[in-house]
Amino acid sequence: MIGNELKPRIGLFGRRNVGKSSLVNYLTGQQIAIVSDTAGTTTDPVRKSMEIGGIGPVVLVDTAGIDDEGTLGAQRVEKSMAALAEVDLALLLYTEWGEPEERVVRWCTEHSTPLLRIRSKVDTPDFPNHPDHPDFRLTTSDPSLREGLIEAIRKAMPESAYHKRTLLGDVVHQGETVVLVTPIDSSAPEGRMILPQVQVLRDLMDLHAVAVFCQPEELEVESGKWKVESPRLVITDSQAFERVAAVVPEEVPLTSFSVVLARQKGLFEEYLEGTRMIGDLKDGDRVLLLESCTHNVTCEDIGRVKLPAALKKATGKSLQCEVIGGQSPLPKDLSQYALVIQCGGCVITAQQVKARLLPALEVGVPVSNYGLALAWCGGIFDRATKIFKQ
Ligand code: SF4
């Protein structure tokens, strides 16, 4: 998944049996997708990492029909529409035009997602009163059209799809020193480093900065005679934040790995705003905690134990915290929640985190993030986010 993040994501949308799976095969030149004349062959969105000649490595997101029917069909349509939020470019295939197509166009317009309208199966007659103008006319039975289609996709693909977002490139520069405080505990036992630490280290290497690792106790021992001269920044594990904050001089910027990752994975401005709403929570308020994977739950679990306890302690309120793990569907009525708090989302893309949070934002529910919420509860929110607000 980490590798996939750096590849442009192209989504295929359209009614059942409009030729989406045939297009996957046409683009890749391989029989990768199952093609069937039976409508509804693709059910949930299918993500495939592949190389397309003329474009390069991409992730193709093949979706179910946007016109599916019945209770299950409606759920598939919702999943297909939700997949729009994770793609850099949407390909809308159609042989007729109506509300399903308009819905995709509206979504892309509202969310500034580039869209390529492809009139599929052009060897079939045009439908009457066609109100739309395709960007491309295609039949996958004609290989000579492939080059033109590739060119159209290349032109429509936004530049941002190719850029890896740096974690710290806006605040750390070449030659500057960053101290990384990494406790060895049950989540990072001896011989292992956790993913956020590895990601931050890699980013610092890319920036040609100097990374100094230590555990909290070394920082304390060294505090009086700190050998690290004028570090640009100290980044610590959230769990050790208070301990580290007590040692690191006030003038040295301090943040946590989870805050750094929150900037990359999600809606940081919305997180900042939503996190402040913790102070407004009232007795009986419901808080929805979203975890992007179904990791092994331990007795120290952040979503089920630590964060609910920290929220209760910091607000003094009796809150109802509920956790949803993996990609389980969100509750239908999100407006019943006073706050939604998203985990770091280390196994999914930034676009997928956004897709998960958009329904809450659309009904006016504030959103926060595990690391930021813990920082707020620990009273260190302002300090942990200060460097990113300058
Ligand atoms: S941060 Fe989220 S996605 Fe990553 S391990 Fe924790 S629950 Fe799973």
Image (cartoon, rainbow, N blue to C red):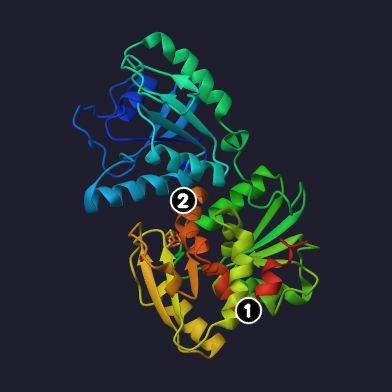
**x and y, in percent, of residue 128 in the image:** 37, 23
The residue drawn where x is 35% and y is 29% is: 96
Q: Would you name the residue on which mark 1 appears? A: 242
**x and y, in percent, of residue 158 in the image:** 59, 33
Farthest left residue in view:
38
Which quarter of the rendered image does ligand 1 occupy?
bottom left
**x and y, in percent, of residue 389 in the image:** 74, 62
Disc 1 element: helix
- Count neighbours of disc 1 (C-alpha within 10 A) and say few if under 14, some if 14 to 19, many if 20 or more: some
Instruction: Report the disc number at residue 215.
Output: none
**x and y, in percent, of residue 32 in the image:** 29, 27
Q: Is residue 12 left or right of residue 39?
A: right
Up the image or down, 334 lies above or below 264; here it is below
Q: CA distance from mark 1 to mark 2?
A: 31 Å
Q: Which part of the image, by quadrant, shows the N terminus?
A: top left
Q: Quadrant of residue 17?
A: top left
Judging depth in this view, the residue of 158 and 297 nearest the camera is 158
Judging depth in this view, the residue of 84 and 74 nearest the camera is 74
The residue drawn where x is 47% and y is 20% is: 136
Q: Would you name the residue on which mark 2 appears? A: 352
Disc 2 element: helix
Q: Is residue 209 left or right of residue 157?
A: right
Asked if ligand 1 lies within 8 A of label 2, the reply is: no
